[in-house]
Amino acid sequence: MNRNRITRCLAGMTMASGLLLGGGPVLAQTMSSYGVFCASGRIEIDARAEDQMRSQRGACQFARFSTRSDAENFARRNFKAIGAPCSCR
């Protein structure tokens, strides 16, 4: 019983230190998502944030997904292919 109590206490302290040091749960910081963008007139999939893509590449975002395969499927369904022509207008 004491061992369980110690384990729970240590787990709580680990989570608390992750919140204090990292600003959020450790697992949440490692999750990524993928955007479907129009960059340089072509459909692209990228993990960068919409703001970064807009400022670095002049891109616009059409959608964002938790997995790359979902983003690729969206691009194929809506634009026929990754690399297909597109416009931000």
Image (tube, rainbow, N blue to C red):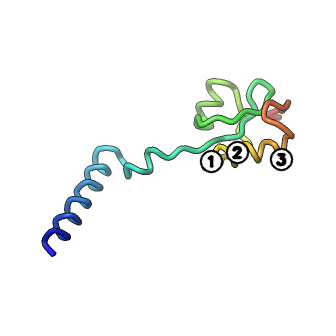
| CA gap, disc 3 and disc 2 | 10 Å
Please provide percent x and percent y for residue 15: 29, 55
Quadrant (top left/top right/bottom left/bottom right) for the C terminus: top right
Q: Amino acid at mark 2?
A: Ala
Left or right: 32, with 50 as reference point: left
Q: Which residue is mark 3?
A: 77
| CA gap, disc 1 and disc 2 | 7 Å
Left or right: 42, with 1 as reference point: right
Query: Which secondary structure lies at badge 3?
Result: helix
Q: Amino acid at mark 3?
A: Arg
Q: Dot 3, how many residues are within 10 Å of its Cα: few (below 14), some (14-19), or many (20+)?
A: few
Query: Is 19 placed above or below 47 here?
Result: below
Q: Point out the residue furthest to the left here.
A: 2
The residue located at (20%, 59%) in the rendering is 10
Sequence-wise first label, 3 or 2? 2
Choose top left, top right, bottom left or bottom right for residue 2: bottom left
The residue located at (63%, 30%) in the rendering is 53
Query: Which secondary structure lies at badge 1?
Result: loop
Residue 71: which numbered mark, if any?
Answer: 2
The reply to whether callout 1 and callout 2 are in contact (CB within 8 Å) is yes
The reply to whether callout 3 and callout 2 are in contact (CB within 8 Å) is no
Q: Which residue is mark 1?
A: 67
